[in-house]
Amino acid sequence: MNKTKLLAPLLLLLSISIDSGAASLDSLVRANNLNAAVVVKSLKTGKLDVYNPQRAALQFLPASTFKIPNTLIALQTHAIRGLHDTIRWDGQHRSVDAWNHDQDLLSAFPYSCVWFYQVLAARIGNDTYLQYLQKLHYGNQLTGTDVTTFWLDGELRISALEQIGFLEKVFLRQLPFEEEHYDLLNRVMLADSTANYRMYAKTGWSARVEVETGWYVGWVITPDDVWFFACNLQINQESDALFRKELSYRFLRDLHIIPESNSSR
């Protein structure tokens, strides 16, 4: 049975309050002709705010947002041993300058260094990934024919709603990983810190397929709650990728979770 069809009636109920809560987000989407979904969930109340519920239920390649579980899996299986365990650069020049040197988790995670995580994937192996995807209930729990690219152009798929469920389990440390590995993930995921909040997040962009998808997912810690968020959008031109973060910040502002004065750039 189609999971999207099952989710749709529930999502329509969840979206009742969205029209008044996402006015500027909706204006931003419409002004730039974007096809996007954003989901925010409160840890304290469990309340879900969903922009574009139909798209929020659809599964897409996770791209580099998979570096969140991938980092935990790599640490747990000892494919990498800590933040400063270095993998030497092979000397091949790639399109992102930040990738063209030796890498460790502190450099590879924030700059989405593909080759670094491909080396880890080869060390981990497909059978181990399939076991962990099942344990984590991560998306459709599939890999594909190439263990080094399944999150980029293989069979793995996950929806924005499923990202929220996974992120909540990561934050609450309810998955089969050691405490120190959660601590290390938090170190590399910290993306924004102000007097009002701390944001832990990861971008993603599935650029190897015909219909490209951009992601921004994570959680925001405020003085009175923790808020999980997941944004995805269809990328039709390179400039659309800028909206991954902007839409996420815009919805968080519309919901009065972060102050209006903070920038998403």
Image (cartoon, rainbow, N blue to C red):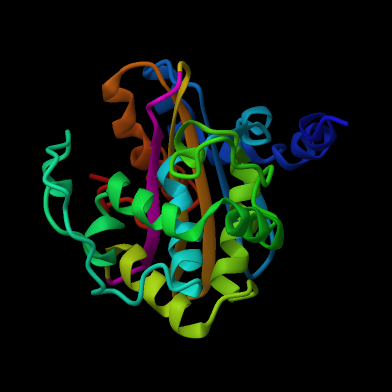
Magenta highlight range: 195-209
In this view, the residue in front, 202 or 25, is 202
In this view, the residue in front, 147 or 159, is 147
| 211 in relation to 108, above or below | above
The residue that appears at 46% across and 16% down in the rendered structure is 210
The residue that appears at 53% across and 61% down in the rendered structure is 227
User: In the rendered view, does 41 fall on the left or right side of 214?
Assistant: right
- Residue 114's spot in the image, x, y percent? 31, 45
Locate residue 2: give its quadrant.
Answer: top right
> Would residue 112 be seen by someone viewing this image from the given angle?
no
In this view, the residue in front, 264 or 184, is 184
The residue that appears at 67% across and 41% down in the rendered structure is 17
> Would residue 191 be seen by someone viewing this image from the given angle?
yes
Q: Quadrant of the N terminus?
A: top right
- Residue 14's spot in the image, x, y percent? 73, 42
Taking the magenta stretch, the answer to whether it contains residue 25 is no
Q: Residue furthest bottom?
A: 179
- Count the marks: 0
The residue that appears at 68% across and 28% down in the rendered structure is 54
User: In the rendered view, does 167 fall on the left or right side of 190?
Assistant: right
User: In the rendered view, does 140 fall on the left or right side of 2?
Assistant: left
User: In the rendered view, does 190 fall on the left or right side of 174?
Assistant: left
Majority secondary structure in the magenta region: strand
Taking the magenta stretch, the answer to whether it contains residue 197 is yes
- Residue 118's spot in the image, x, y percent? 37, 48
Q: Quadrant of the C terminus?
A: top left
